Image: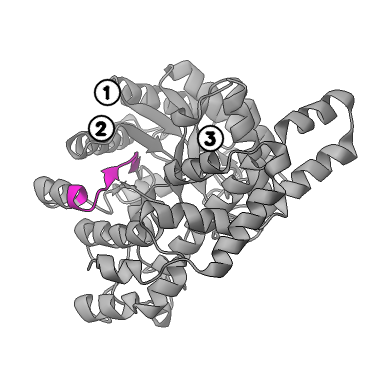
Amino acid sequence: MRISEDQLASFSSTDFHIRSLDLLRERFSKQNLNFEQVIRKIQEFQIAIPSAALGNGKAKNKKSRTGGEPRNLNEKLEDIGLLQQLTCKTNSVSVYIPWDMPEDYKEVKDLANELNLEFDTMNSTSSQDQNQKEYAKLGSLGNPNKAIREEAIAHNEEVINIGKKLGSRGLTVWMADGSNFPGQAKFRSTLGWTEESLREIYEFMPSDWDLMLEYKPYEPNCYHTVVPDWGTSSMLAKRLGARAKVLVDLGNHLPKTNIEQIVATLMYQNLLAGFHFNDSKYGDDDLNPSSVKPYQLFLIFCELICGDQDGAQAWDSISWMIDASYNTQDPLVDLIQALEAITIAYTKAMLVDRKKLQECQQNGEGSQAQEILQMAYLTDVRPLVCEARVRAGGVAEPLEAYRILMIRNKLVHERGVKSYNSIF
């Protein structure tokens, strides 16, 4: 389904929004902050939607399923098109293979063009469906059995070939390889086999593609994971070549990890590939971005903006994608909330007075530096985000529009109440 221009136009901004925007402009006038530039940057900031996030078929309880979920990649593109109409915040899809194999490449590409969508980084699932029995036991790219490793490599090469047909220019690799008991695996051997496998994949990629290496401290293995942290991931990236970098999944960290420091360290080395935006309470929860640790997300964006301005790593070299698990909620509602939360954190980070902050850092004035960050963080920037969205052609309040237009009900009517997307 598509939302008509008249329907979009009916959800315009209010007088209260205009007054709120004027108050923000007045508040930050002394900081010489260019509001028009801020609004333009908000509009330019686009976040990819993973094809795996458009359904909640992962929910074990059938009563949690929303119905009307997309049954194939084409319908997923249609749902992302709806998100883009409402939010003007996502212009691309990141496809997971084999969960979302295109049935007709021309049809898929034509539909994407019609919806003004592009294909972002491809995602292989080396630890999932290809040979689940063997992979779960001894791993995929780091498996002691060379035949199993070659099978996993072939899967990644297949994903690359699919991505080439769709117009993607990158591959994200994450493996669940590891062990559950001391002595079960030889650490150096599994790491070495993993590097060898990744090298074959890296060399198979087109010269204009990037390889993004994810890391995860645990799950499904509880004793050791082959690529457990950013250090191991960055070591592998450096050994592979300049087109390999580290992907930061915000939820895949141990409790109390200083993720903003990891981001700064990777930018210092020009090794930051991008983000999977989510949140966590304990360490690997895939919760909605900013639902638990909004200040952490703000601080991460502070490092990203600072690193770009200082010339450590260019903003345009970084990829952005949501990666959360909407098990029990309407996935489109949660995606709208996620896009809004990420954009709010980014906007707040743009309001930081970096000149004053740098002076405080140079002079060791910790409390004043904290006040500068807090002033930006505690600012209600929703009027700025709303203004950017409306100017781009979206609606003032996407969730309100989604509910008033009864979009989920219409999707259920089109696809059926029992329609769900089960990929796990």
Foreground: disc 3 or disc 1: 1
| Image coordinates for residue 177, horizontal then vertical, percent | 47, 41
Q: Quick one: label 2, few (<14), some, or many (20+) residues within 10 Å?
A: some
Q: Is residue 42 visible?
A: yes
Upstream in the sequence, badge 3 or badge 1? 1
What distance separates the C-alpha of mark 2 from that of mark 3? Answer: 20 Å
| Image coordinates for residue 255, horizontal then vertical, percent | 70, 50
User: Label for residue 157?
Assistant: 2
157 lies left or right of 230:
left
What distance separates the C-alpha of mark 1 from that of mark 2? Answer: 7 Å
Q: Nearer the viewer, residue 97 or 311?
A: 311
Q: Residue at x 43, y 17 (%)?
A: 242
Tell me the residue that label 1 is attached to: 204
The question of residue 157 being in magenta is answered with no
Tag 3, which secondary structure? loop
Q: Residue at x 45, y 43 (%)?
A: 45
Identity, as a three-letter code, of the amino acid under mark 3: Val
Quarter of the image for residue 65 reads: bottom left
The question of residue 117 being in magenta is answered with yes
Tag 1, which secondary structure? helix
Pointers 1 and 2 in contact (C-beta within 8 Å): yes
Q: Nearer the viewer, residue 323 or 77?
A: 77
Identify whether 322 is placed above or below 360: below
Quadrant, the C terminus: bottom left
Identity, as a three-letter code, of the amino acid under mark 2: Glu
- Residues in magenta? 112-123
Tell me the residue that label 3 is attached to: 227
| Image coordinates for residue 256, horizontal then vertical, percent | 73, 47
Identity, as a three-letter code, of the amino acid under mark 1: Phe
Upstream in the sequence, badge 1 or badge 2? 2
Q: Residue at x 22, y 62 (%)?
A: 75
Pointers 2 and 3 in contact (C-beta within 8 Å): no
